Image: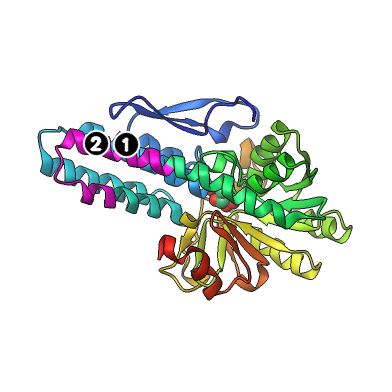
Amino acid sequence: MSSRPETIEWIGSTDGHLCLIDQTLLPTDLQRIDCKDVETVWEAIKMLRVRGAPAIGIAASYGTLAGLQTVDDQDAAAFKARFEEVTKYLETSRPTAVNLFWAMDRMRNCFAENESMACGDLRSRLLEEARAIHAEDRQMCHSIGKHGAGLLGGVSGVLTHCNAGGLATAEYGTALSVFFTAQDQGHDLHVFVDETRPLLQGARLTAWELMQRNIKATLICDSMAAQVMKEGKVQAVVTGADRIAANGDSANKIGTYSIAVLAKAHNIPFYIAAPSSTFDLSIQSGEQIPIELRGSDEITNGFGRQTAPDGVEVYNPAFDVTPAELIRAIITERGVIDPVTSSGVADVVGAAVG
Ligand code: MRU
């Protein structure tokens, strides 16, 4: 691995702070920002300084600790009220990635189970829980890589969309973990990277991560995926996910659905790689997944230049939902879901999140 700083790090004890790579500055500047209060954590999530479903959940878990620093340990009722306020507030930062809500529920359960403790001890327990969420994600990513690499036998070219790498998780990633593990096993892959309009997570982040790992990466505009498939350059597609419904319908970065349709048309397997924390078994299908709508500026004035006329109407959904029938398999830390059906999902991750 390269020696780059951690994507997310809690520095110090319960009175410490959150330190994040500011992903909006990549690939030109590798800088970290300190988040010393919950508002700064919220802003970092909202503005995609920290992004990717698992990373959002981890950052928000630590964010609860930052939010509790304004409250006195002597007042248990105020401590509880502040905890409730802070977790609810963090949940308003972004709606689609279920890992955020999953992580807040973990923190709430931890609070409820330890409510009889003195506030100082409860604070320490909450920090332990946030650190556990962080450490578990690291493990899950490595396991996803191991399960996924086996699916790429005979594959030389793969396509990915957005960024599902170490920047989107505790470390190693989900989709990229599959490529990193294949590489560790001596399998040379050539990864075609969709640039991922409008915020260019593919160009800015995935291409950067792959190059750091010396994996052959070729950047393409999103609209080139069909041509790359037609030319036979890729034999598999692997992406991450932000929320997976009980029937396997999977929300991921806008444009993923188009790629899955294209993969079907070219008879290329389309895989999703995601941890069990990305499954939302409370919803039956992708129809119920909330899709984040973001500002028009991201499309009309991306990266400092106006590229559309003043006043033009814009529609900017940040995610789309790929129907289960287009997904060849879902790679989780617990094993591979294949076929992608409600019972397949329940068999592999039902116990984890049901
Ligand atoms: O808007 P973003 O950059 O947070 O969207 C991220 C994605 O869509 C990722 O593919 C997904 O969260 C999986 S990250 C392991």
Foreground residue among 323 and 222 = 323
Q: From the image, give the main secondary structure of the stretch colored magenta.
A: helix
Per the image, the residue denoted by label 2 is: 123
The kind of secondary structure element at disc 2 is: helix
* Quarter of the image where the N terminus is located: top right
Per the image, the residue denoted by label 1 is: 127
| Few, some or many residues within 10 Å of mark 1 (<14, 14–19, 20+) | many
Foreground residue among 40 and 20 = 20
Tell me which segment is drawn in magenta.
108-133
Q: Quadrant of residue 46?
A: top left
Residue 45 at least partly seen: no
Say what amino acid the circle numbered 1 marks. Leu
From the viewer's perspective, tell me whether residue 351 is left or right of residue 121.
right
Say what amino acid the circle numbered 2 marks. Arg
Q: Which mark is residue 226?
A: none
- 210 falls in the magenta region: no
